[in-house]
Image (cartoon, rainbow, N blue to C red):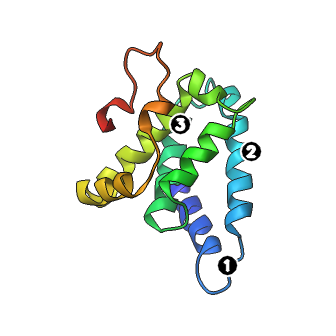
Amino acid sequence: MERELLAKLLVSLCSGRHNLLSKQQLSDGLSNVLASLEDNLSDAPRATEYLGRLLARFMEESILLLQEVGKLIQESGEEPGYLIQGGIAADILGAVLDSIKSDKGNSFLDEIKTTSSLKLVDFRPQHLKRSKLDAFM
């Protein structure tokens, strides 16, 4: 419930006529969250799922594009690419796509994937046998 209220608040702040939170400010905040994500996974093992749902909501409301979400994930972490190497990026992006599929359906998801130049395979490290992203590749 609280996570949904947070999503609604952030969407309201980023959209509308007053635009109180710019896209850059939102991206900076999300980057900070992603930078500390690995440290918080032991305390909140479903953090990638929750963050994925939040990012999906921004995409569903046309605040962020899939390509922008991918860039945030790629560039964040302790250093660029760190979340990909650990498999965390695949979990986040898998949760994003799963949430979009649940909320908006396959046609909306397919449109987002088709209009983006993002390569999902780039978010899946070779050493992983399975990831949440596999269903969307």
Residue 1 in view: no
Q: Secondary structure at mark 2?
A: helix
Considering depth in this image, is 46 or 80 the residue closer to the camera? 80
Kind of residue sitting beneath label 2: Asn
Which label was assigned to residue 41? none
**Residue of label 3:** 48
**Residue of label 2:** 32
Q: Are marks 3 and 1 in contact (CB under 8 Å)?
A: no
Q: Earlier in the sequence, mark 3 or mark 1?
A: 1
Kind of residue sitting beneath label 1: Asn
Distance from disc 3 to disc 1, alpha carbons, whole Å, reads 27 Å
| Residue sitting at the far front | 117
**Residue placed at 72% from the left, 37% from the top?**
35
Residue 52 in view: yes
In percent of width and height, residue 25 lies at 74, 62
Write down the quadrant of residue 116 in the picture: bottom left
Q: Earlier in the sequence, mark 3 or mark 2?
A: 2
